[in-house]
Amino acid sequence: MMFAPNTTALVHLGGSVYVRFSLLALSSIFFLVDPFAALPTFLAVTAGQDSAKRVRTARKASLTAFVILSAFALAGTYIFRIFGISLPAFEISGGIILLLIGLDMLEAKRSPTQEVSDETAAAATKDDAGIVPMGIPMLAGPGAITSVMVLVGQAHQSEGYWQMAAIFSAIAITAAICYLVLGSATRVASALGETGIRILIRVMGLLLVALAVQYFVNGLADLGVLTRPGIG
């Protein structure tokens, strides 16, 4: 007797995998871009600007981050091929970079890979700092770029075109939140307060450290050193 496959179970499994990857993409990209940690720098850079100009700067910074991260998402596979980099190698190196950034965030401070004091001081004297340094590297820094490329590598490895759609959606959502947060920087900073921002950064840092370790474990599992743990 022939038994029909359990379509409901298959749909549920596919949906579960889609949701998990989408949440992974959104959380890893958002935590690394982290517009809340960029608030103090943004306020310092835009000091003296009226609200309309500050909103324009926020829009330009968010758009720059979207373009940069999307470009690396599109070119990620070709970069792997050109330089002969394997996905496990990038997962391990990316995990180390994310770990360093996450440890800095646990101390409620921006990592030097995302922000350099000299760049912040120079930006304060510019008429328009929305692209550099606010857009890159403060929002779209090395950590966010690395995370996008690892996600793209995983998507192409499993031939999941829906995963690429999830990555681009995560980039777009993150850029939109950046615009909303930075565009209302004064109100957001007042509502959260310095203590609230520090707590938020530390929580994101903790989650980022966990993501970094997971990237590292995935890289070792792909090399056959470890067995990839299952997710219940």
Image (cartoon, grey):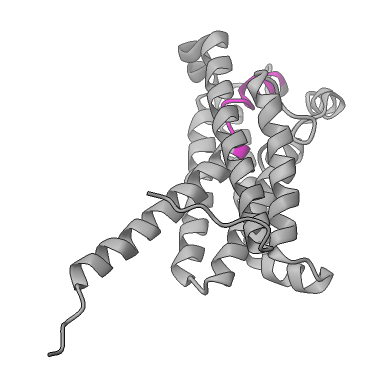
Magenta stretch holds residue 41:
yes
Q: Nearer the viewer, residue 217 or 41?
A: 217
**Predominant SS along the magenta part:** helix
Taking the spot 71% from the left edge, 49% from the top edge, the residue there is 94
Would residue 90 be visible to someone looking at this image? yes
Q: On the picture, is 180 further left or further right than 116? A: left
Q: For this view, does 23 lie left or right of residue 86?
A: left
Q: Give me the residue at 66% from left, 31% from top.
A: 102
Asked which quadrant contains residue 139, the reply is top right
Per the image, is 171 magenta? no
**As drawn, 21 above or below 31:** below
Residue 129, image x, y percentages: 74, 34
Residue at 87 percent across and 26 percent down: it is: 118
The x and y percentages for residue 207 are 54, 33
> Residue 103 appears at what percent x and percent y?
69, 27
- The correct choice, above or below, for 13 with respect to 110 in the image is below
| Residue at the bottom extreme, as displayed | 1
| Residue 104, horizontal then vertical, whole percent | 71, 25
Residue 222 left/right relative to 187? right
**Which quadrant, please, contains the N terminus?**
bottom left
Q: How many marks?
A: 0
Q: Is residue 205 above or below residue 170?
A: above
Q: Quadrant of residue 36?
A: top right
Residue that lies at the very extreme toward the left in this rendered image: 1
Task: Return the residue nearer the eye: 13 or 187.
Answer: 13
In the displayed structure image, the side of residue 157 where residue 124 appears, left or right: right
Residue range of the region highlighted in magenta in the rendering: 32-44
Residue at 20% over, 73% down: 7
Q: Look at the image and tell me whether residue 134 can be seen.
A: no
